Structures are given as C-alpha cells and as structure tokens.
Image (cartoon, helix red, strand yellow):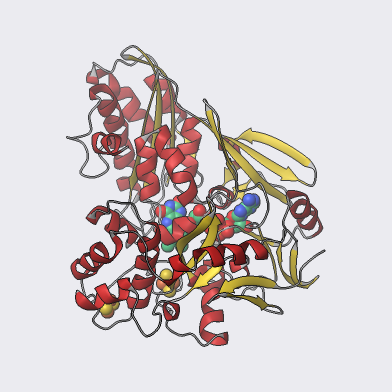
Amino acid sequence: MVRDTIRFWRNGQAVEVSGFHPRTTLLDYLRLQERRVGTKEGCAEGDCGACTVALGRIRGGRVHYEPINACILLLGQVDGAELVTVEDLAASGELHPVQSAMVAHHGSQCGFCTPGIVMSLFTLYHEGERPLSRDNVNDALAGNLCRCTGYRPIVDAALEACSGQADDSFSANGERTTQGLMRLADGRDVFVGNESRFFAAPASEASLAALYAQHPDATLVAGCTDVGLWITKAMMEIEKIIWLGRVAGLDAIEESSDALGIGATVTHAEIHPSLARIDPDLGEIMRRFGSVQVRASGTVGGSIANGSPIGDLAPVFIALGAELELRHGDAVRNLPLENFFIAYRRQDRMPGEFVRRVSVPKLKGDEAFRAYKISKRFDEDISSALGAFKFTLDGRRIAAARIAFGGMAGTPKRALETERALVGVSLDEPASWGEAMAAIARDYQPLDDHRASSAYRSTVARNLVFKALSETASGETRATRIAGRREALQAAE
Ligand SMILES: Cc1cc2nc3c(=O)[nH]c(=O)nc-3n(C[C@H](O)[C@H](O)[C@H](O)COP(=O)(O)OP(=O)(O)OC[C@H]3O[C@@H](n4cnc5c(N)ncnc54)[C@H](O)[C@@H]3O)c2cc1C
Ligand code: FES
Ligand code: FES
C-alpha cells in the first residue's frame, strides 16, 4: 500500500509530514514550519555549510551520522532518517562536548557559521577516523566557511572534542534510535500529492520504472546537489519529483576481482574507499569532490546523468573503460559510458529512462593510472579541467592508452589523437613524447569561461600529458605534486 506522508525520527520520536510542496527544502521546513532558526542560510547553494544538519541512518547495524546541507536537500529526502539540528545537541542544560570545546577555544566570533560548524563537528565526533589528525579535521570542515574567527581555534576545538569515542545522549540512545528507524523502514512506496504535483519515493525498481514511464516529465532526484540549485538559484517550477533514495538495490556496490559495479544511488562518500583501492589518485579525486556534505548526498548516478562537462567522475570512469546500464520500463540496456554523452548537456537517455548502474573495470597488472583535478582551490571547488590517463604497458613502452578529460569540451571526452600518438612511445625517451603532447591540441578546442581561459586549459592539458608520462616513467610524485602525493596516499592505506 502506498504511503502519502513522509516519516522521520526527531528528538526520540517519529514525525509524520504530509501535504507539503514537492520543492520544499529541508532548510525552509526547519526555519518556516518548525521555526527552528538555529540552522542558517548563507549561500543557498551548498558551498558555505551554514545550513549543516545531521542525518542518521542505519549502517552496519547502528545509526551512522552524516552532515548535510539543508539548503539543497528536499524535505522529502529525510524520509526514514533521524534528523538532528543544532538545537538538539545540548542535553539537560549541558552543552554538547563539541559546543563546549568551541567555547573553550574561542571558536566563534559573529557566530553565523557556528551552528553549521558545530553540526559538522557533531558528525566528526560520532564518525571521524581515530586517531584523528589535523588533516582529517581540515577535510571534515572543507564545506564550512568561517569569515571572521579563522580556522585554527575551530580545528583545535575539533581535535579536543572529537579524538575519543562518542559519549553523548545520541550514543546513549543509539539502540532506541535504531529500533525507531527500523520501524520507519516499511518498504512502502511514498506518494505525496496528486497526479499533477507530487513528491514520490518508490521503494523498488519496478515501482520506479512504472512511475517514471507514466510521468516521463517528472524530475528524478538522487542526492539533489544539482537539482537543489535549480530550485534555490534558478527558481525552477518543478512540480513532479521522483526521489530515488528509497529504491531498494540501487544503492548496491558489487565488487569482483576485476570490476566494481556501482548502483546509481551510491553516494560519493560510500564509493570513496572502493575507488581509492583501485588507485590512490581516485581516492584523492574523491577527497576533493565538493565537501563532506556534498559527498554525503551526491550520488554516482546523479553525477553521470547530469551530463556536466566539468563533472569529476565521468572522465575518470571513461579512462578506466566504464559501462553504463540504463533502464526503461522492463528494458535494460548497456553502453560504453563515453557514448552516453552526445553533446553539451545532451545524453543518450530516452524520456522515462534512468541510470541504473555503472560498471568500472579495475586496473590490470600491466596498467598504470594517473588522474589530476585542476581547480582554483584544493577543496570544495569545481574543476577547470580534469585529466585521467590509463596506460597499458609492455615493459617500458606504452602498448595502448585511454585518456579522457573533463572541462575541455562540451562533454567529458576521450583524447583519441593523443592516445594514438602514444602507442609505442618509450617511457625512457622523453624526446619521443612530443608528438603526443602536440596531439592534445587537435583533440580539444576548449572554451573560455569564468573558470579558465581556452589558452590556459590547452596549456594545462598538454602539461598533464607530460606529467602523467614522467610520473609513470619515474614511479614517483615527490617532485611533481604539492598535494595528493601517491607515496603518502599509498603509505596511509
Ligand atoms: C557545493 C557543491 C560542490 C560540488 N563539487 C563538485 C565536485 O567537486 N565535482 C563534481 O563533479 N561535482 C561537484 N558538484 C556537483 C554535484 O555534486 C554532482 O554533480 C553530484 O554528484 C550530482 O549528484 P546528485 O545525486 O546530487 O544529483 P541530483 O541533483 O539529484 O541530480 C542531477 C541530475 O541527474 C538526474 N538524475 C539523478 N539520478 C539519476 C538517475 N539514476 N537516472 C537518471 N537521471 C538521474 C537528475 O534528474 C538531474 O538532472 C558540486 C555541487 C555542489 C552543490
Ligand atoms: S546555505 Fe550555504 S551551504 Fe547551505
Ligand atoms: S564566526 Fe563569523 S563567520 Fe565564522
């Protein structure tokens, strides 16, 4: 039976909401309906973290907390989760340990960013790596901007509060919350609204396929890190929303000895460790993908389906030789990922068809991989260009190459001329690399935009061909990188 409400866990009890507009964001719900205004709006586009709240979901048999940007999350997406906001942390008149540490270390001045920072630290308090390093804290706070305090006291507060095991009212109530969340997981389809305006959350692939075939004009939402901005920035009138987050099985990761099968709704946070095991450069690309908040919501399927020419995953997956699986009604088809991108923002996807899964081959013993994200900031920034290189080696010669770039054309695209020019090239003879470095100019004629000029992008692409070859030749990255050195990443594994 279909449910016409959403249900979530809040302050130890189930909350049921019905009759909301499908476009309602979680931030608007909190501030305008609940009148809980501790959660702030800064940018309304997922960049500043002022709106950070925590969502708890059951993973590995216990409640797992993640930070979420409430400004670009739809209210309906909290279905089945525990919602925690800054007002919920202090218990029995006592500040939460992360709040006390922020006070003790003078981690707040004007205070506008503070609720968001406290909520990010709350999730670090529960989930962060142990032992916790300053780098771990910096990564955890990459999605939280503070414009007046400066980060040193905030990081000090985090290190003091979040280095031990969680011991607060949330850990004490963990079993009760788990039971509550299990009761909410009823496996029913959700449909709030009517035939012309609705928020739907099908629970199975069959329900999704049927609903989307019936409403091919509906907007699919996975993590909402792109669609959220259509709502808050482009003010789009989206009336029909189908959220994929409850579809059983679409969130599966299937790993075999030679490939990784990634379901469309697997989040960037979830896939990060598996990709890092394929190659350390993939781990580094994922560490720099948005922020913890963006990685907790954004999905692999959404990143591919949106067809962005500057998305980070498509070029690395194309270089690895990934295949895409699409479903329409009962029909499933596969295609090489590179063929999915037809032209700027135009993909090979029929009305009513959805991305089901992407299959990414692992590297073989004779293959070397390098990937480079070029952006203005290291953290929380979209790529100006991203180059991914897979070389098949025959001893010290290149037997075959697969190269793909983002940011260099209207779609993520292979560098076919460069690939051809590399066949037979010796890693020990840099003088023979010139033809390949020149060929990249024939592969791409990039555009000027506010991120980078065409000339800059062309120079960067040429230099990245040289960098990939010289790093593969030497096996070292100490002299070629200031961050993300492979030696350090491999040692940390
Ligand atoms: C602050 C911020 C930082 C970001 N940083 C980066 C970055 O560093 N690198 C990067 O590449 N991107 C970045 N992004 C972009 C965004 O996070 C990614 O594109 C993201 O992965 C989109 O996934 P999603 O699940 O949120 O997609 P959604 O917003 O839910 O959907 C995106 C599009 O895909 C469609 N869609 C979603 N799932 C499916 C499916 N299964 N089948 C068919 N269509 C589907 C939707 O209808 C929509 O058109 C950033 C975004 C923000 C807000
Ligand atoms: S308001 Fe800036 S991330 Fe949400
Ligand atoms: S305390 Fe003012 S922005 Fe951080």
Q: Position of residue 357 (x, y in %)?
A: 62, 42
Q: Nearer the viewer, residue 287 or 422?
A: 287
For image coordinates 52% across by 88% down, the residue present is 35
Q: Vertically, is 399 above or below 215?
A: above
Residue at position x 42%, y 33% from top?
A: 278
Q: Looking at the image, which residue is at 30% across and 47% down? A: 456
Horizontal arrangement in the rendering, residue 199 relative to residue 410 (left or right): right
Q: Quadrant of the N terminus?
A: bottom right
To which quarter of the image does residue 425 belong?
top left
Q: Is residue 39 left or right of residue 94?
A: right
Depth check, front residue: 450 or 364: 364
Q: How many marks?
A: 0
* Residue 384 seen in this snapshot: no
Residue 484 seen: yes
**Where residue 24 appears, x then y in whole percent?**
60, 76
Task: Find residue 350 and report its horizontal and vertical position in percent.
Answer: 72, 48
Q: Is residue 245 above or below residue 436?
A: below
Residue drawn at (37%, 85%), measured in percent from left and top?
Answer: 93
* Of residues 342 and 47, the one drawn nearer to the viewer in this rendering: 47
Quadrant holding the C terminus: top left
**Residue 417 versus residue 61 in the image, above or below:** above
Left or right: residue 228 versus residue 170 is right
Q: Residue 473: horizontal and vertical position, in percent? A: 26, 22
